[in-house]
Image (cartoon, helix red, strand yellow):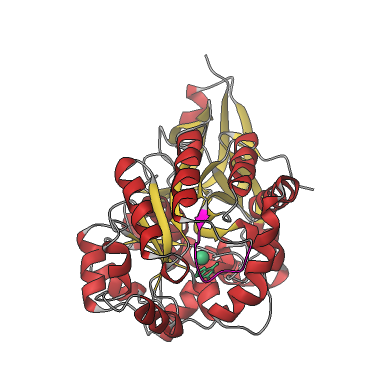
């Protein structure tokens, strides 16, 4: 029989979406989770699990909270080294900081170095899956998937395609974007725990012809995801209107090219028209909320409550390095603050759901990750809910699990991350 490990603590079990049912109906706390061969075998009372598996190795986490590993639904790993760059809005930020850094990823050694650094930094924050943009260079994609495989992490990524409005050395072409994306998709999709996302950066940096070629590739490979950016800043939207005068709206630039569908991931999606909202909902596309990025770059306030009420599929993301943190705790805190500014505060259960099951669902990985349930992959984060004196003194008089976890959501950082399990194994990279 396979080796069984039992983790005891406060195990957060997700039964439903806290956007559909009450927090206490959506999530309950169990005492233990049993894992074997990289998957969750059982969840329940400590006594029952220990009795069923007397030879199991036991990891006792006391009153720490055991959650599904965090799922970051939109990142740019090549922007790791330029996170927290000062003073620009989107287009200037791309030209001043992002594009010069992305230029470096044609060098496989540099791409490998940053991929390893990125995975170390995010694992320390309890993130076990992410969906990343790479750069135009196939080397950047190879480096990311290879490093993920070494760490046995479930990831989604793709080659970022741009054939205009980017500097020399950072443009591909219609043909090379299609050919390279196809080769990389066929090489990495479904290999280990990886999935490929066809990745036009956004409409301003792709010609109509490039978008159409990538739409054709998606039609040939509907099993792949497609990720891009949509309606992040008002200046960007005005630019899209100039570049695509025939389009009904920003979304139409993708729709006309075959880049709208289920499995489509649209980052930011802040300033949407009613037609765009309706179409995104109709095709069951995914929207990705990037709250620290949206405040850091000054983009706007995502309408979480309104979009959820319409039934959209929504994930949560750092958008590293436009986002100002690698931490999904910090990202949940920013989502809460944006909710407050819109007079629609998110409940702690909703924040935790977005960072786990919600993002997994946005990535179409809800059968694999994002919940602690039998058969799911054993990616877990163990949180210390008293990781600093300030958090501990607030959590000390919590009356329920939600009051106990909320101070860590709002004030926690990597000190709250007591342990991380990836594919059923403890992550060994901690200092
Ligand atoms: N829009 C197009 N590219 C990017 C990017 O790298 N970051 C963000 N935040 N928005 C974008
Ligand atoms: Zn982005």
Residue stretch rendered in magenta on the structure: 160-168
Asked if residue 123 lies in the magenta stretch, the reply is no
* In-front residue for pair 33/185: 185
> Is the residue 49 above or below the residue 183 in the image?
above
On the image, the x and y values in percent for residue 127 come to 58, 52
Locate residue 203 relative to residue 329 in the image: left or right. left
Spot occupied by residue 94 in the image (x, y as percentages of width and height): 59, 73
Q: In which quarter of the image is residue 266?
A: bottom left
Q: Nearer the viewer, residue 33 or 99?
A: 99
Residue lying at the far right of the rendered structure: 431
Q: Magenta residues: mostly which secondary structure?
A: loop
Q: Along the line of sight, which residue is nearer the eye, 359 or 262?
A: 262
- As displayed, is residue 30 above or below residue 36? below
Q: Residue at x 54, y 73 (%)?
A: 293
Q: What residue do we see at 65% from left, 40% from top?
A: 147
- Residue 5 screen position, x and y as percent: 58, 29
Q: Judge whether residue 386 can be spotted in this image.
A: no
**Left or right: residue 293 compared with residue 373:** right
């Amino acid at each position: 029989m396979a080796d069984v490990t039992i983790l005891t603590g406060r195990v957060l079990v997700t039964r439903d979406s806290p956007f559909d049912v009450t927090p206490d109906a959506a999530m309950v706390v169990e005492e233990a989770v049993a894992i074997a061969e990289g998957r969750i075998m059982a969840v329940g009372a400590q006594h029952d699990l220990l009795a069923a598996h007397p030879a199991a190795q036991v990891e006792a986490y006391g009153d720490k909270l055991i959650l599904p590993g965090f799922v970051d639904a939109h990142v740019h790993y090549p922007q790791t080294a330029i996170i927290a760059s000062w003073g620009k809005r989107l287009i200037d930020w791309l030209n001043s900081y992002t594009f010069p850094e992305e230029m470096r990823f044609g060098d496989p050694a540099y791409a490998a170095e940053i991929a390893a650094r990125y995975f170390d930094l995010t694992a320390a924050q309890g993130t076990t899956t992410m969906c990343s943009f790479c750069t135009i260079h196939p080397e950047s994609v190879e480096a990311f998937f290879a490093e993920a495989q070494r760490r046995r992490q479930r990831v989604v990524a793709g080659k970022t395609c741009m054939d205009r409005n980017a500097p020399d050395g950072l443009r591909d072409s219609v043909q090379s974007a299609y050919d390279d994306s196809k080769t990389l998709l066929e090489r990495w999709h479904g290999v280990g725990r990886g999935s490929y996302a066809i990745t036009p950066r956004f409409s301003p940096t792709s010609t109509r012809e490039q978008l159409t070629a990538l739409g054709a590739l998606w039609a040939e490979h509907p099993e792949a995801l497609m990720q891009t950016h949509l309606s992040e800043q008002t200046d960007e939207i005005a630019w899209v209107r100039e570049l695509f005068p025939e389009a009904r709206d920003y979304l139409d630039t993708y729709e006309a090219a075959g880049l709208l569908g289920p499995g489509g991931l649209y980052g930011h999606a802040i300033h949407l028209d009613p037609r765009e909202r309706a179409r995104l909902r109709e095709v069951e596309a995914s929207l990705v909320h990037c709250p620290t990025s949206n405040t850091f770059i000054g983009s706007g306030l995502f309408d979480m409550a309104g979009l959820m009420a319409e039934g959209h599929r929504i994930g949560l993301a750092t958008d590293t390095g436009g986002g100002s943190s690698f931490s999904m705790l910090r990202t949940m805190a920013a989502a809460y603050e944006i909710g407050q500014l819109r007079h629609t505060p998110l409940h702690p259960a909703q924040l935790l759901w977005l960072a786990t099951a919600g993002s997994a669902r946005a990535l179409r990985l809800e059968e694999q990750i994002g919940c602690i349930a039998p058969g799911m992959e054993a990616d877990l984060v163990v949180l210390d809910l008293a990781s600093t004196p300030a958090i501990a003194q607030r959590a000390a008089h919590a009356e329920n699990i939600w009051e106990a976890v909320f101070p860590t959501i709002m004030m926690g950082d990597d000190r709250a991350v007591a342990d991380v399990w990836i594919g059923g194994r403890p992550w060994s990279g901690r200092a």
